[in-house]
Image (tube, coloured by chain):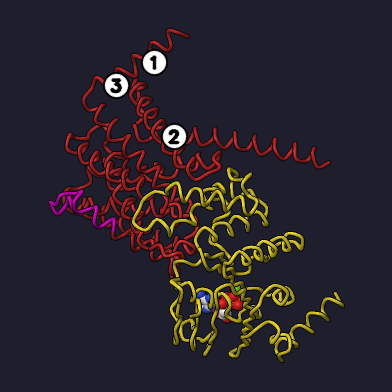
Chain colours: A yellow, B red
């Protein structure tokens, strides 16, 4: 059974339809990139997967014991205030909140998990630093660590590299790839199609009311894929 | 120097020899702690004005209760809790701008309160005491109420510490990982409302909001983690309360400073001090940063 599948999903804001008739499924271990222009509904889709926004029609089904609460999420634009004083450790540990269930305090196990995740992402030595004083790349790592603490199976990343410089972007992609290789399913929203094609094994391209969903190789050969990829190549040559 | 400390000690211990002073200290210290803890979330979520608005609603509700011969606290607490829900909702669904909504509610409540008082008893000292508090006039039962409610608030805050941090830091993430963020927003709202109603008795509508805002703003100048902000603002709030009371007690010749005003002034002083330290620290850092870079 698929880890997650969407059947005939439609999403709307106050009657204005953003997505309609969308169907796709994600298997365990997949690396799915959701691409599409700004405003095509990528973040809206993410919100529906997380259960933050109800579908106008259709359904989202979770398999393999996953539920919306077990998804590790890295938001596109956080409502985190610029001047919020929180240490790196506090932010990462807050990712374990869904493991508390009825308890009030974090156990040794959850604290150890936060420590491990910080070491894994190379932020262990800044664990006492204030989140607001970090560079953009460091902040994204912290949020990735927090997301990783929240899940055993599925990471959902909404434009995790936007605003990062090329070097840091590459590092971030590398990290996400390693996490995926370790067995965690990744769904990543991106508007960087060349990188999506490089890393992902499945592509979901939202385009107006239509969409493409399939293997990356199929996407490259498809109408939509070849059109967007050649447009990107041209832009790179000119730029 | 030694003489100064002896007289300071005598003056501080002297305070404890009056029953009304002990009551004021115990009740006030507890309320100060509670308001500083809740203030952290209110200030960080940019809801400080809600605290101010609620104190006016609390004034209005107490005035109406007095005019109607109802028990003031029992009447005011549910009303203020309701107002807290309303204001938080208004802030989220921003049809009406949040800050105008707060101004709207708080001025109306103030008007209703004044109208209720003057139509029943005529403006008298009661208005003054509700505007500026009657810290030194707390009865035994007032203090008991303070102790009970503060204990509940402190315990709830400690128990929900991790969740309160999460909803304050990033509500969407917290919601996405399955925590009922709305519920904890409500917990914060209820605790804040109760703190404000109790604090109103002592500090008055005018000054309670400063108890919520000042210690947190001071702590924010220097702290680098949420936990330290919480601990430092609670400590500052207690210390400033004590110092403010002492000033008001000590300098009562020939004119006295009301305790509420004394507490706010001390808080202001601490805030300025902390801001200065923070400014110097940042300035030093940027200078050394330039040196290292150049
Ligand atoms: N909260 C909202 N209320 C109304 N419309 C919205 C809201 N959020 C997004 N939209 C609209 O939905 C469409 C899709 O937005 P979004 O999912 O953020 O796109 P993307 O993430 O692909 O850039 C856009 O046209 C946007 O204007
Ligand atoms: Mg988006």
The residue that label 3 is drawn on is B15
Q: Please, which chain is the residue tagged with disc 1 on? A: B
Residue A72 magenta: no
Q: Main secondary structure of the magenta part?
A: helix
Viewer-proximal residue among B76 and A119: A119
Specify few, some or many for label 3: CA neighbours under 10 Å numbering under 14, 14-19, or 20 or more: some
Front position among marks 3 and 2: 2
For image coordinates 53% across by 87% down, the residue present is: A23
**Marks 1 and 2, how far apart at CA:** 20 Å
Q: Please, which chain is the residue tagged with disc 2 on? A: B
Front position among marks 1 and 2: 2
The residue that label 1 is drawn on is B8
Residue B185: x and y in percent read: 38, 58
Cβ–Cβ below 8 Å for labels 3 and 2? no
> What residue range appears in magenta?
B64-81
For image coordinates 61% across by 86% down, the residue present is: A213
Taking the image as four quarters, which one is ligand 2 found in? bottom right
Q: Quadrant of the C terminus of chain A?
A: bottom right
What numbered label is drawn on residue B236?
Answer: 2
Residue A77, image quadrant = bottom right
Which numbered disc flags the more N-terminal residue, 3 or 1? 1
**Marks 3 and 2, how far apart at CA:** 20 Å
Residue A145, image quadrant = bottom right
Viewer-proximal residue among B40 and A227: A227
């Amino acid at each position: 059974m698929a880890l997650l599948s969407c059947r005939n999903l439609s999403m709307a804001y106050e009657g204005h339809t953003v997505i309609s008739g969308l169907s796709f499924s994600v298997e365990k271990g997949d690396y799915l990139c959701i691409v599409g222009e700004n405003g095509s509904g990528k973040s809206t889709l993410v919100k529906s997967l997380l259960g933050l926004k109800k579908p106008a029609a259709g359904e989202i089904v979770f398999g393999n014991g996953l539920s919306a609460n077990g998804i590790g999420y890295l938001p596109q634009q956080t409502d985190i205030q610029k001047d919020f004083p929180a240490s790196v450790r506090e932010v990462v540990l807050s990712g374990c909140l869904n493991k508390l269930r009825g308890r009030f305090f974090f156990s040794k196990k959850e604290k150890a998990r936060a420590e491990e995740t910080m070491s894994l992402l190379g932020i262990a030595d800044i664990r006492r630093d204030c989140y607001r004083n970090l560079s953009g790349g460091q902040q994204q790592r912290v949020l990735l660590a927090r997301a990783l603490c929240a899940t055993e199976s599925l990471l959902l990343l909404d434009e995790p590299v936007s605003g990062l410089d090329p070097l840091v972007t590459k590092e971030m992609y590398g990290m996400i790839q390693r996490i995926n290789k370790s067995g965690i399913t990744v769904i990543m929203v991106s508007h960087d199609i060349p990188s999506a094609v490089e890393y992902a094994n499945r592509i979901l391209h939202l385009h107006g009311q239509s969409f493409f969903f399939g293997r990356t190789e199929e996407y490259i050969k498809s109408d939509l894929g070849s059109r967007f990829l050649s447009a990107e190549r041209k832009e790179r040559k000119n730029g | 120097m030694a003489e100064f400390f002896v007289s300071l000690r005598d003056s501080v211990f002297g305070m404890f020899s009056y029953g009304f002073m002990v009551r004021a200290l115990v009740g006030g210290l507890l309320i100060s702690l509670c308001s500083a803890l809740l203030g952290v979330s209110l200030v960080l979520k940019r809801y400080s004005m809600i605290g101010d608005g609620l104190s006016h609603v609390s004034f209005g509700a107490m005035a109406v209760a007095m005019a109607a011969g109802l028990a003031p606290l029992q009447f005011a607490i549910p009303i203020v809790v309701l107002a807290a829900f309303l204001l938080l909702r208004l802030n989220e669904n921003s049809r009406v701008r949040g800050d105008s909504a707060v101004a709207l509610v708080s001025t109306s409540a103030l008007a209703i309160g004044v109208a209720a008082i003057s139509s029943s008893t005529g403006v008298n000292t009661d208005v003054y005491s509700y505007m500026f508090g009657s810290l030194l006039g707390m009865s035994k039962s007032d203090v008991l109420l303070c102790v009970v409610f503060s204990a509940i608030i402190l315990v709830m805050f400690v128990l929900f510490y991790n969740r309160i941090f999460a909803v304050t830091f990033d509500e969407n993430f917290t919601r996405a990982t399955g925590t009922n963020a709305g519920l904890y927003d409500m917990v914060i709202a209820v605790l804040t409302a109760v703190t404000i109603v109790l604090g109103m008795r002592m500090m008055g509508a005018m000054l309670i909001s400063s108890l919520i805002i000042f210690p947190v703003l001071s702590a924010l100048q220097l702290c680098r983690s949420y936990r330290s902000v919480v601990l430092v603002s609670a400590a500052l709030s207690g210390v400033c309360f004590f110092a403010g009371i002492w000033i008001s007690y000590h300098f009562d010749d020939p004119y006295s400073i009301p305790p509420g005003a004394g507490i706010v002034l001390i808080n202001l002083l601490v805030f300025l001090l902390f801001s200065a330290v923070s400014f110097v620290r940042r300035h030093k850092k940027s200078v050394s940063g330039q040196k290292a870079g150049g």
